[in-house]
Amino acid sequence: SQKIEQNSEALNIQEGKTATLTCNYTNYSPAYLQWYRQDPGRGPVFLLLIRENEKEKRKERLKVTFDTTLKQSLFHITASQPADSATYLCALNTGGFKTIFGAGTRLFVKA
Amino acid sequence: ETGVTQTPRHLVMGMTNKKSLKCEQHLGHNAMYWYKQSAKKPLELMFVYSLEERVENNSVPSRFSPECPNSSHLFLHLHTLQPEDSALYLCASSEGGGTSSYEQYFGPGTRLTVT
């Protein structure tokens, strides 16, 4: 069956460190992989998109990698800040309008 | 503000009630989505409309009925819901068709409680 896995355990890191979140998937051949941020009680906010033929994408302190051989994406936040504390969702699009979301990983950045 | 608004933000309804959720997008997108988000579960895609035509319908019970009168508005009509339908209902919009990237812009959600 098709599955997206994100670490269900919360990630706790110290301010200033790099946070690395993992998204693994099985039985998909995604055209795009996206990362979203969600704060409690609010809708997800789009952060970055990476295409299947791209290895890495950066935006300010954010970096996403995409390894279609390992079927894995890594999401990095460098110089993390307490304001980065949120749940981060991985999402796959295999073409068309259907996007499949992971359950998300909760990140806590401690001052 | 993402350019997608949802009303109401909170709704409590009994199992015999009929209510509607409303979504409006101001981004000029031509695709709109309804998702259900239950605690600690992934977002579940319910319906997708592109240019006012339904293009995805993910085996959603008939007690949920979508309506898309134009590309800026989307409704979810609710009737005879069950307590397990209590969740955060999220609306989203995106560009669509051709080589568009389908990144989605979400509204703040409607927190629905069925008693």
Image: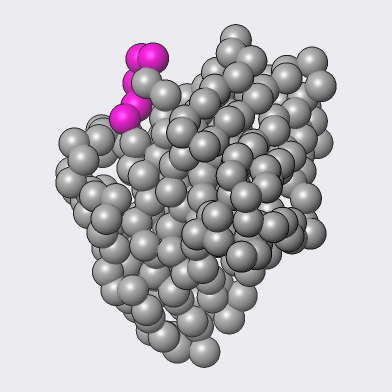
Query: How is this picture coloured?
Result: one colour
Q: Nearer the viewer, residue A6 or B43?
A: A6
Magenta region: which residues? B95-99
* Left or right of B76 on screen, residue A20: right
The quarter holding residue B48 reads: top left
The quarter holding residue A9 reads: bottom right
The residue located at (70%, 33%) in the rendering is A74
* Left or right of B75 on screen, residue A108: right
Query: What kind of secondary structure does the magenta stretch mostly adopt?
Result: loop
Residue B62 percent across, percent down from the top left: 48, 60
Asked if the stretch drawn in magenta spans residue B91, the answer is no
Residue B105 percent across, percent down from the top left: 36, 44
The residue located at (51%, 50%) in the rendering is A37
> Quadrant of the image for the C terminus of chain A?
bottom right
* Left or right of B20 on screen, residue A34: right
* Left or right of B39 on screen, residue A97: left
Among all residues in the image, which is located at the extreme top?
Answer: A53
> B8 above or below B16?
above
The residue located at (41%, 85%) in the rendering is B12
Q: Is residue A72 visible?
A: yes
The residue located at (79%, 30%) in the rendering is A26
Q: Is residue B62 visible?
A: no
> Quadrant of the image for the N terminus of chain A?
top right
Residue B38 percent across, percent down from the top left: 60, 66
Count of labels in the image: 0
Residue A28 percent across, percent down from the top left: 71, 26
Q: Nearer the viewer, residue A107 or A32?
A: A107
Q: Nearer the viewer, residue B88 or A73?
A: A73
